[in-house]
Image: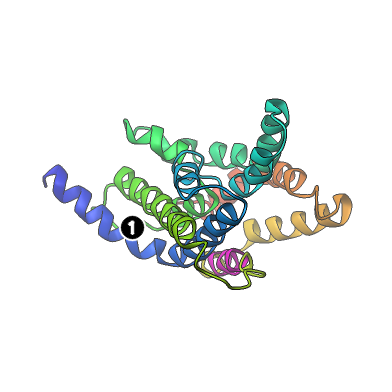
């Protein structure tokens, strides 16, 4: 099969997985673009930032950082704190991202929560190039966010509606992803570990500080349990 044919098959296989992401990113991207617009930034700001930063939480925070005094150390600390979870994502994807040539650079740059969830859990059909599949998942999600942010930036001054509660779209989407993964698993040890550790860390550290400790503990527990889980077939591809 030609390279063009392989890309086409991978795109067709990847696209259905990203449809739920489109709904969430379109609404949140629109909200972000409108927020930038009402904060006094021209339409091209959300377009440029969505292309080059591609980190939704950081982009929202960046609005206030751009409006405040220039403090690069504060920006660095804030960005690391908000996106520290990506360190754990990266460790989880080391094997999957290895050996994809130049595509690895974009896969690393574009690995958001949603792309990680799909690329880590998706059952890629036989005959579909894994590298191109993950590339198109990442590219499509990136485009969805850019598309929403661009529309919000352009039409922000013309649209008037209450955006409160739109962030729940992403929460609902992750619940759906979790339930889909739960249904695929033969056993639920990994999922139960994740839920249990997260609840314990939420109680111990509070809602503002539980995420990083929870991820560290989950990583440690699943690393310890990796061999038993692999033997039981739960961690297989």
Residue 216: horizontal and vertical position, in percent? 72, 41
- The residue that mark 1 highlights is 14
Residue 234: horizontal and vertical position, in percent? 54, 56
Query: Which secondary structure class fits the magenta region best?
Result: helix
Taking depth in this image into account, of 16 and 78 the one nearest to the observer is 78
Could you tell me if residue 225 is visible in this image? Answer: no
Residue 211: horizontal and vertical position, in percent? 73, 49
Q: Residue furthest bottom?
A: 161
What segment carries the magenta color? 169-178
Where is 121 relative to 64, above or below?
below
**Dot 1: element:** helix
Where is 137 relative to 21, above or below?
above
Is 174 left, or right, of 82 in this rendering?
left
What residue appears at the point 56 percent right and 67 percent down from the top-left corner?
182
Is 60 left, or right, of 7 in this rendering?
right
Within the magenta stretch, is there residue 175? Answer: yes
**Residue 174, quarter of the rendered image:** bottom right
Residue 54: horizontal and vertical position, in percent? 50, 44
Q: Characterize the local packing of mark 1: few (<14), some (14-19) or many (20 or more) Cα atoms within 10 angstroms.
A: many
Tell me which colouring the rendered structure shows: rainbow
Taking depth in this image into account, of 77 and 9 the one nearest to the observer is 77
Number of numbered discs visible in the structure rendering = 1
Is 100 left, or right, of 151 in this rendering?
left
Q: Residue furthest left?
A: 2
Q: Residue furthest right?
A: 204
What residue appears at the point 35 percent right and 65 percent down from the top-left corner?
16
Within the magenta stretch, is there residue 3? Answer: no
What residue appears at the point 43 percent right and 60 percent down from the top-left corner?
151
What residue appears at the point 51 percent right and 40 percent down from the top-left corner?
53
Could you tell me if residue 51 is visible in this image? Answer: yes
């Amino acid at each position: 099969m030609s390279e063009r044919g392989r890309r086409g098959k991978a795109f067709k296989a990847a696209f259905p997985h990203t449809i739920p992401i489109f709904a969430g990113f379109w609404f949140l991207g629109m909200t972000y673009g409108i927020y930038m617009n009402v904060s006094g930034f021209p339409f091209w700001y959300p377009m440029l930032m969505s292309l080059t930063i591609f980190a939704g939480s950081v982009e929202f925070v960046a609005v206030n950082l751009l409006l405040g005094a220039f403090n690069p150390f504060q920006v660095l600390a804030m960005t690391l704190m908000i996106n520290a979870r990506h360190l754990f994502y990266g460790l989880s994807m080391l094997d999957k991202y290895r050996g994809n040539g130049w595509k690895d650079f974009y896969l690393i740059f574009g690995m958001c929560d949603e792309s990680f969830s799909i690329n880590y859990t998706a059952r890629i059909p036989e005959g579909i190039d894994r590298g191109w599949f993950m590339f198109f998942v990442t590219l499509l999600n990136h485009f969805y966010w850019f598309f929403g942010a661009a529309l919000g930036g352009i039409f922000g001054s013309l649209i008037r509606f209450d955006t409160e509660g739109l962030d729940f779209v992403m929460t609902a989407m992750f619940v759906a992803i979790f339930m889909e993964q739960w249904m695929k698993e033969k056993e639920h040890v990994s999922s139960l570990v994740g839920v249990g550790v997260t609840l314990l860390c939420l109680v111990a550290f509070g809602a503002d500080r539980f995420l990083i400790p929870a991820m560290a503990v989950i990583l440690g527990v699943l690393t310890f349990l990796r061999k038993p889980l692999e033997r039981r077939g739960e961690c297989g591809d």
